[in-house]
Image (spheres, grey):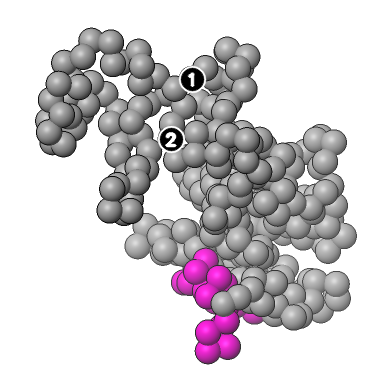
Amino acid sequence: MLLEGIRVLDFTRALAGPFATMILGDLGADIIKVEPPGGDEGRTWAPIVGGESAYFLSVNRNKRSIVVDLRKDRGREIIYRLVKTSDVIIENFRADVPKKLGIDYDTLRSIKDDIIYCSIRGFGSKSPYEHKPAYDVIIQGMSGFMMTTGEEGGPPIRAAFALFDMFAGLYAAISILSALLNRVKSGRGTSIEISLYESSIYTMSYMILSYALTGIKPKRYGSGHMSVVPYQAFKCSDNKWIVVGVANDRFWNRFCRAIGLKELCEDENLFCRLQPPV
């Protein structure tokens, strides 16, 4: 396994952090999940099957778990011994909490100077919301994402899964892998910060840039696309649905022939009529 021999001390809970450490565990790292008395809150989220949360199980495979009360000296002593044999620390507390618990970067770096320390926050350092907690649905709303989903004139629509939690977890895993590579080259550890909000803006990519360059706010297209047509779901005459993704003229010509409407691909004016409204 690629990360065999790498130990990760995981203080995260809920989704973004556990997803990041699950990826590292899938790559062979030894993940020690540190839970507070009472456990990760994700253990209580439905559906519960055989006494276990399916939600929790979906992002916590390939891990070993211990319960440690970080508010007590004895708990911190246990953690400090584990830090000495660990390569990566990852946490997703509010910004002011690690220092209070004695597991902040400066404290743990004094124990192991080449430690890689990753923090996942709702909002970045020096943000006006720096010390505020955040869940994925809050980020979906604040980022503007929920104003791009659903049908025009309808209410804001949340993605069915924790979209930006997952992206933040991916970015955390990528950053940790980069830091491990850098440590091989330089011998130095580092501190990493991943923000759910910044991850959302980064991930929305062309929608953000399109607005920045044109000044035109993104509209809602239902299952459609802001710049590619046809690229959406269509209801058929038998009340079943199909999804069509035609991203260029070559595919459009093939699509027209496939559905027996060859004349459409020969209509020089059709391209203009197919463009989404501005």
Instruction: Please give the name of the residue rendered at 57% of the width and 13% of the height, measured from the top-left corner.
Output: 213
Q: Which residue is mark 2?
A: 224
User: Which of 13/147 is in front?
Assistant: 147
Q: Residues within 10 Å of mark 1 (few under 14, many from 20)?
A: few
Q: Which quarter of the figure has residue 76?
A: bottom right
User: Which of 178/84 is in front?
Assistant: 178
* Bounds of the magenta segment: 48-66
Q: CA distance from mark 1 to mark 2?
A: 12 Å
Instruction: Please give the name of the residue rendered at 86% of the width and 76% of the height, measured from the top-left corner.
Output: 72
- On screen, residue 201 versus residue 235, left or right, reads right
Type of residue at label 1?
A: Pro
Is any part of residue 206 visible from this angle?
A: yes
Is any part of residue 117 visible from this angle?
A: no
Q: Which residue is mark 1?
A: 277
Q: Position of residue 62 (x, y in %)?
A: 46, 72
**Mark positioned earlier in the residue sequence (1 or 2):** 2
Type of residue at label 2?
A: Gly
Q: Residues within 10 Å of mark 2 (few under 14, many from 20)?
A: many
Magenta run includes residue 114: no
Magenta run includes residue 51: yes
Residue at the top extreme of this rendering: 268
Instruction: Please give the name of the residue rendered at 23% of the width and 10% of the height, measured from the top-left corner.
Output: 268
Placement of 179 over or under 213, stated as above or below: below
- On screen, residue 259 versus residue 38, left or right, reads left
Q: Secondary structure at mark 2?
A: loop
Q: Position of residue 274 (x, y in %)?
A: 35, 21
| Quadrant of image for the N terminus | bottom left
Q: Position of residue 74 (x, y in %)?
A: 81, 79
**Are the residues flagged by discs 1 and 2 in contact, CB closer than 8 Å?**
no
Q: Position of residue 239 (x, y in %)?
A: 33, 53
